[in-house]
Amino acid sequence: MTEKITVVKIGGNVVDNPSALSAFASDFASLPGKKVLIHGGGKEATRLSSRLDIPTIMIEGRRVTSADTLEIVTMVYGGLVNKRVVAALQSNGCNALGLSGADGCVIPATRRLPQPIDYGFVGDISPIEINTTLIAMLLDAGITPVFCALAYDKGGCSMLNCNADSVSSAVAIALAAVAPVTLTFCFEKDGVMADVDRPDTLIPSITPSVFECLKSDGTVSGGMIPKVTNALAAIRSGVSDVRICRSDLLTTDRGTVITIPADEV
């Protein structure tokens, strides 16, 4: 496969908002060539957990997944949210197929060890284990895979919750071994901001050294840490271009571009 593949990740600001999802689906469907979409779970899982009195615990932007929480995220991510996204794409002429990592064993994972932090039923994904043959078959058939952030526990016969940014990075890295790949992380801001309250403070590019400085001074924190970490991992592993931007900027060039200069390789 030599045709470029576009991998896009969307989060809660899109999947929780019907008008934003509709607009995004139109933009995504208009992208030329083969494409893959990965989505997060948004706030639906948190809302359902609250209604069931199941506490939501986050550490560095990552959800701690108990056995009860795993049931909730499987229902919400793999069911409600995934099919909501697929329906939006279908209505825009994009023939999409919703999948979890268990379907076709396309994204196997290993349950994360409990040290130094016990995240519960959370998985780590190795790009070399992703079933790129299946993904390529779908793309060649004109079908756009839509993945939720659930992987298959190859050692425990269960689902594992994964960070959607990590899934996106791993899928992009895996596909980069067979075709040129671009990766875009969409979220609620124009990109990485020096001041989240000022739209004129967009940081146009981030390198590894800049990232360390931004973490040290608190500019990058919470859920942005795994996002930039995964973006850098993707560039290091052969993904051609990585950008972080607002979902309605998908078809533009605006956003934060992740780069690794020769002297930081």
Image (cartoon, rainbow, N blue to C red):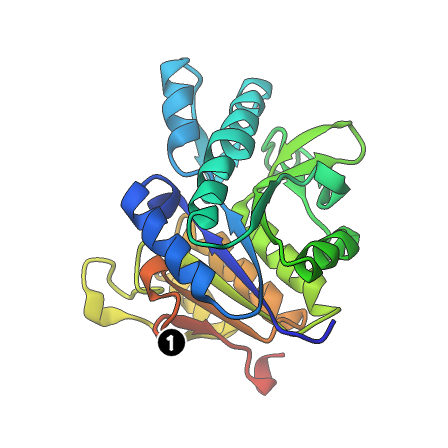
- 194 above or below 126? below
| Residue 146 visible in rendering | yes
Rendering quarter of residue 250: bottom left
Image quadrant where one finds the N terminus:
bottom right
Q: Residue at x 40, y 21 (%)?
A: 48
Q: Is residue 47 left or right of residue 156?
A: left
Q: Residue at x 36, y 70 (%)?
A: 255
Residue 117 in picture, x, y percent from top left: 59, 36
Residue 254 in picture, x, y percent from top left: 34, 73
Foreground of the two, 95 or 259: 95
Q: Is residue 211 left or right of residue 131?
A: left
| Tag 1 residue | 253
- 156 above or below 199? above
Secondary element at image label 1: loop
Rendering quarter of residue 133: bottom right
Tell how many labels: 1
Residue 142 in picture, x, y percent from top left: 63, 58
Q: Residue at x 63, y 62 (%)?
A: 172
Foreground of the two, 214 or 162: 162
Q: Amino acid at mark 1?
A: Asp
- 43 above or below 248? above
